Image (tube, rainbow, N blue to C red):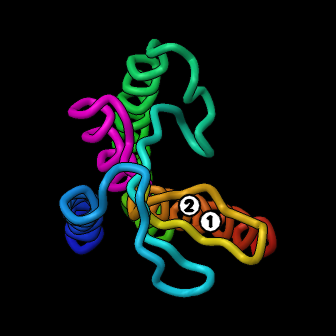
Amino acid sequence: MRKFILMSIFILILDQATKLLVTSYIPYESYIEISSFFKLVNFHNTGAAFSFLHNAGGWQRYFLIFITLIAVVWIIFMLMKNKHMPIISLSLLLILGGALGNLIDRIRLGYVIDFIYLHINGWYWPAFNIADSAICVGAGLLIYDMYRRKNYV
């Protein structure tokens, strides 16, 4: 369990460090083209996933902080309940590290810094960050574990 907790802390630190680097070297709404399908950008997301609620007038900041705090408490409760289940623990700690990374941005800045921008031809995936990636991988592992247990129980 300690390894998983350290991984969660590592995700949080990596997320914050990469966001600091991006804001130090890339001006807001600018980019560095890495390849034909990958850009490093400096975007500010005042909303939730995929910029949901980004034009809501400001109240969404406090709403999303509140929801994230509830999620963090729930994740900690679920970790204690499932501490002997390694895939679930790993999943929850990935989600926790990502949620805390974005929560720090939202409290400190009022928005989340997104900097990974993928595209193929005219198809663009919304910009995201390390925290978002950890949350998605954690959610994917939870889905995998539910599927695995459903088929083997």
Question: As shown in the figure, which amino acid type bears the numbered disc 1?
Answer: Gly
* Residue 61 x, y percent position in the rendering: 41, 22
* Residue 41 x, y percent position in the rendering: 43, 62
From the viewer's perspective, tell me whether residue 83 is left or right of residue 25: right
Please tell me whether residue 44 belongs to the stretch shown in magenta: no
Q: Are marks 2 and 1 in contact (CB under 8 Å)?
A: yes
Q: Secondary structure at mark 2?
A: helix
Question: As shown in the figure, which amino acid type bears the numbered disc 2?
Answer: Cys
Q: Which residues are magenta?
A: 95-113
**Marks 2 and 1, how far apart in space?**
6 Å
Name the one closer to the observer, 68 or 37: 37
Figure disc tally: 2
Q: Quadrant of residue 130?
A: bottom left
* Residue 74 x, y percent position in the rendering: 42, 35
Q: Is residue 36 above or below residue 60?
A: below
Q: Quadrant of residue 109?
A: top left
Camera-nearest label, 2 or 1 = 2
Crowding near the residue tagged with mark 1, few <14, some 14–19, many ≥20 C-alpha atoms within 10 Å: few
From the viewer's perspective, tell me whether residue 62 is left or right of residue 50: left
Residue, disc 1: 140
Viewport quadrant of the N terminus: bottom left
Crowding near the residue tagged with mark 2, few <14, some 14–19, many ≥20 C-alpha atoms within 10 Å: some
Viewport quadrant of the C terminus: bottom right
* Residue name at image x 62 percent, y 81 percent: 37
Is most of the magenta stretch helix, strand or loop?
helix
Farthest residue to the bottom: give it.
Answer: 35
* Residue name at image x 26 percent, y 30 percent: 107
Which label is found at residue 136? 2
Q: Secondary structure at mark 1?
A: helix
